[in-house]
Amino acid sequence: MPSSQTHARTFSEVLEDLGHGENPKLSLHEVVDRFGERGFGALILVLALVAMIPWPPGGKALFALAIILMAVQLTLLRHEVWLPAWAGKASVSRGFYRSASGKIMGMVRKFESLSRPRLLFMTGKVADILIGVVAVLMALMMGTSAPLIDVLPDLALVLFGLGLMARDGVILIGAWVMVGVSILTYVLAWESLVALFHGVQHTLHLG
């Protein structure tokens, strides 16, 4: 697809187009090829959106790894996307992608209608570096958290991606708020798990 044609289409239209192609498998390389010209924000956004779909155990870890690769390059202020060959070959069934992406397309279009360039002081090189660092943390949390809890860092990544792509400072503020909520929830979940473990251990010791 020519670059001018790609830019003429909205994010949601390109996201929908990924469900159609000659190859029955949709590879990560194709996703990067379609969205690479739109910047790291678009790639983080599409990866985080697809990661929101229910996946078998370990499925989210693959998307977390891809997001980490994008986030590190964002932190380094790279202008072109680099993807190792082994990662680019990772793929899913295009039919499954169509079925799953349809469930989130309404949310994507809603985000698109609300986003626009504003509060530009929240964007720029320094913001890219900070967002890249935090996006690595959010991706790690997303890939290692229990179901339901992993939605919070995933949503933070969605907001970061959209805010970067649209240069929307309001959405980026929302992303930073979601980062705080994610970290707080993650810490509380671990503290509860540790307390439960110690409680069981104490009960067994008494027995």
Image (cartoon, rainbow, N blue to C red):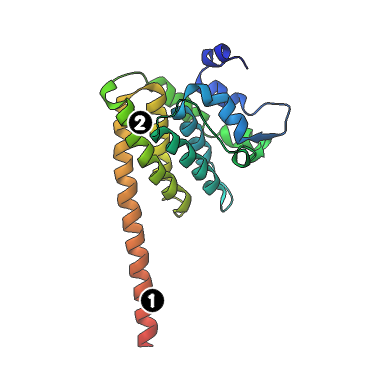
Q: Residue at x 56, y 22 (%)?
A: 14
Task: Say whether residue 32 is left or right of residue 173.
Answer: right
Q: Quadrant of the N terminus?
A: top right
Q: Position of residue 103 (x, y in %)?
A: 54, 34
Q: Position of residue 175 (x, y in %)?
A: 34, 35
Within 10 Å of disc 1 (Cα), the crowding (few <14, some 14-19, many 20+) is few
Q: Position of residue 84 (x, y in %)?
A: 58, 38
Of the image marks 1 and 2, the number of the one nearer the N terminus: 2
Residue 159 shows in the view: no
Mark nearest the camera among 1 and 2 is: 2
Residue extending farthest to the bottom is 207
Q: Residue at x 38, y 33 (%)?
A: 160
Q: Amino acid at mark 2?
A: Asp
Q: Is residue 182 above or below residue 127?
A: below
Within 10 Å of disc 2 (Cα), the crowding (few <14, some 14-19, many 20+) is many
Task: Say whether residue 86 is left or right of residue 70.
Answer: right
SS label for mark 1: helix
Q: Position of residue 36 (x, y in %)?
A: 53, 25
SS label for mark 2: helix
Q: Residue at x 57, y 33 (%)?
A: 101
In the picture of the structure, the residue carrying the numbered disc 2 is: 128
In the picture of the structure, the residue carrying the numbered disc 1 is: 200
Q: Which mark is residue 37?
A: none
Q: Amino acid at mark 1?
A: Val
The answer to which image quadrant residue 31 occupies is top right
Distance, label 1 to label 2, CA atoms, is 45 Å
Foreground of the two, 141 or 72: 72
Q: Residue at x 41, y 37 (%)?
A: 157
